[in-house]
Amino acid sequence: MSDIGKLPIGVFDSGVGGLTVVRALMERLPLENIIYFGDTARVPYGVKSVATIEHFTGQITDHLLNQGVKMLIIACNTMAAVASGVVRQKAGAVPVLDVIEAGAGAAVVESRTRAIGVIATPTTINSNAYARRMHALDPQVRVYSQACPLFVPLVEEGWLEHEVTRLTAQEYLKPVLAENVDTLVLGCTHYPLIKPLLQAVVGSSVRLVDSAITVAEQAARTLNELGIANPGDTLSTYRYTVTDIPLRFQTIGERFLGRSLGIVEKLDW
Ligand code: DGL
């Protein structure tokens, strides 16, 4: 094990949503140090153009590489959908994982009927990134995609069990369920928070794929394969950096993280 093991993993997202990935990483890899970057001044990305997302993603990648990270994890599905090429090009030898590669891979393994649903932001759905990745792994799969733009604000409002969220989910999922999917990919950082509600809407026969959990699994495998896992002789450290600290940031952030946030650093960009 080299000293690289002690370096942090850089995890980034358009805002606070990527803390669902940090939470999964903390549970799966409790010895790893993590730097989180949330672009809270410019969120949401899910309705922005590809060129803008590529530009912002490049800036964030440069920032985290300058911090000296041993691995980058694109926690934002929208960035992974349209700008993962930018990240990989800048990262060079630093390994890059992303939620789409992880979630698509898990869905193809999970599905028995090969009919898979994907729900995500409009930009992620329009990019067709999940479907392309799944078809590359198994050309026989049929992928049914649905943009769910209202879920992000509903989750940030904390309406995780609310009737309005349930009705919205029923409406969005009607066309996907009509195709008899047996697996549904939660293709957005925010959706793991409404997993119980979504499971109730789709029924117990449909498996939900949580990209946060699958990317944490993939991170564990990759760190071991590359021999860069942290041996953990000191307490792990977590740094949270954001571009703005909006109203209710703490409450929303802690809901995503599932624990108290600690010190949050605001960068002047
Ligand atoms: N993080 C985004 C995603 O996973 C959702 C929030 C946004 O639109 O920026 O797609």
Image (cartoon, rainbow, N blue to C red):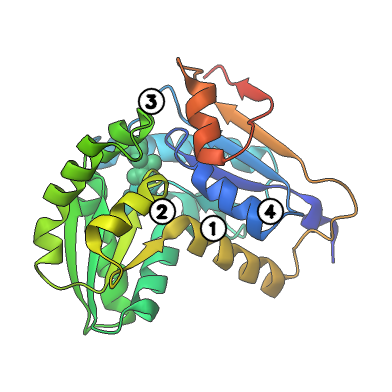
Q: Which of marks 2 and 1 is nearer the N terminus?
A: 2
Q: Earlier in the sequence, mark 3 or mark 4?
A: 3
Residue position marked by numbered label 1 in the rendering: 96
Q: Residue at x 76, y 40 (%)?
A: 237
Image quadrant of ligand 1?
top left
Residue position marked by numbered label 4 in the rendering: 70
In this view, the mark in front (2 or 3): 3
Q: Residue 42 carries which label?
A: 3
Q: How many C-alpha atoms fall within 10 Å of the one at disc 3: few (<14), some, or many (≥20)? A: few
Give the Cα distance between marks 3 and 1: 23 Å
Q: In this view, does 142 lie above or below 177?
A: below
Pointer 3 and pointer 4: residues touching (CB < 8 Å)? no
Relative placement, left or right, of 260 versus 196 is right
Percent across and percent down for residue 11 are 56, 45
Q: What residue type is labelled 3?
A: Arg
Q: What element carries label 3?
A: loop
Relative placement, left or right, of 152 versus 72 is left
Q: What element carries label 2?
A: helix
Q: What element carries label 4?
A: loop
Percent across and percent down for residue 253 are 52, 31
Q: Quadrant of the N terminus?
A: bottom right
Front residue (pair 194, 42): 194
Q: Which of marks 2 and 3 is nearer the N terminus?
A: 3
Q: Which mark is residue 84?
A: 2
